[in-house]
Image (cartoon, rainbow, N blue to C red):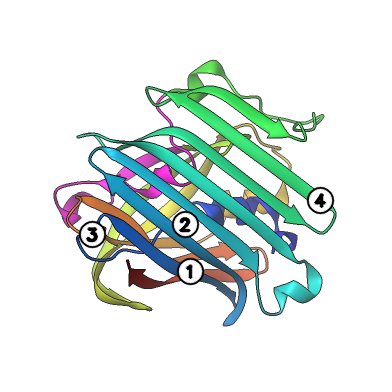
Amino acid sequence: MRKFSKVSAAFLTTLLLPSVAGAAETFSGEYTVSYLGLPIARSIFTSRIEGERIRISGTVSSAGIAKIFDSTTGSSSFSGNISQQGVVPASFTTSYKSGKKSQRTSITFVDGNVAKTVNVPPTKKRRRWVPLRSGDLRAVSDPISATLIRTKSQRHVCNRTIKIYDGEMRANIVLRHMSVGKVPGYNDEAVTCSAKFVPVSGYRPDSSSLAYLKNRSEITISFAPLGQTGIYAPVHATVGTKIGTVTVTARRSAE
């Protein structure tokens, strides 16, 4: 799965969130990532909301034709608080294994600011690199909480900028409203936004995959409400990459 580009895979991780369901405290669901109509990855995520606390955990693995070229497995977990302003992260952990390679990243937040990042093995220093600045790590979200949007109305889901940090790169995702209606794989109404990926720091400026995502990629993300929580989560997404369009589709279920 990671062969088609580390940057593209990292961006898709922000979309692999729990599917929406009824007004229960626990939600679970499956996502399929496909390329040219063929599945390349599957994920299962579960979220639990207890008062103002929210916890999300899940797994992702390569599937279909992707397993022939690169068998990848991974997991992610997140915990945080729900405030009037939105979902505020407290901790985020992700790990993956691809062949003989493995990586683990953990991020600790205090009041929405990054307090500590641990990468195992450590991130390699590169010649050409846009370094992180201290101000880049303030009021940011991890790859899971980044796309959990709290709002009172579907009219306000889009037209915002999401600040995201994955343990190495800081980027913005600029959302603009497109439409409201049905999307593939989801029975109810969803809000669809266009999304522009803007790298800020912590990245290699000569990366062709990153340049494509920034300058040429057409991205859409569709959101639907998570029960009666006031939180909107992604249920469908398309991301243009150098090798073609990758689609993320939810198949929801409730516990």
- Please, what secondary structure does the residue beneath circle 3 have? loop
Badge number at residue 15: 2
Mark 4 is on which residue type?
Lys
Crowdedness near tag 1: few (<14), some (14–19) or many (≥20) residues, C-alpha within 10 Å:
many
- The residue carrying mark 4 is 101
Looking at the image, tell me whether mark 1 or mark 3 is earlier in sequence order.
Answer: 3
Magenta-drawn stretch contains 81: no
Label 2–label 1 contact, CB within 8 A:
yes
Q: What element carries label 4?
A: strand
Q: Which residue has dot 1 on it?
A: 31
Q: Quadrant of the C terminus?
A: bottom left
Count neighbours of disc 4 (C-alpha within 10 A) and say few if under 14, some if 14 to 19, many if 20 or more.
Answer: few
- Asked whether residue 36 is in view, the answer is no
Q: Which of 229 and 113 is in front in this view?
A: 229
User: Which of labels 2 and 1 is toward the front?
Assistant: 1
Residue, disc 3:
24
Could you tell me which residue is drawn at 38 percent across and 63 percent down? Answer: 28
- Which label sits in the foreground, 4 or 3? 3
Q: Is residue 31 above or below residue 160?
A: below
| Mark 2 or mark 4: whose residue is earlier in sequence | 2
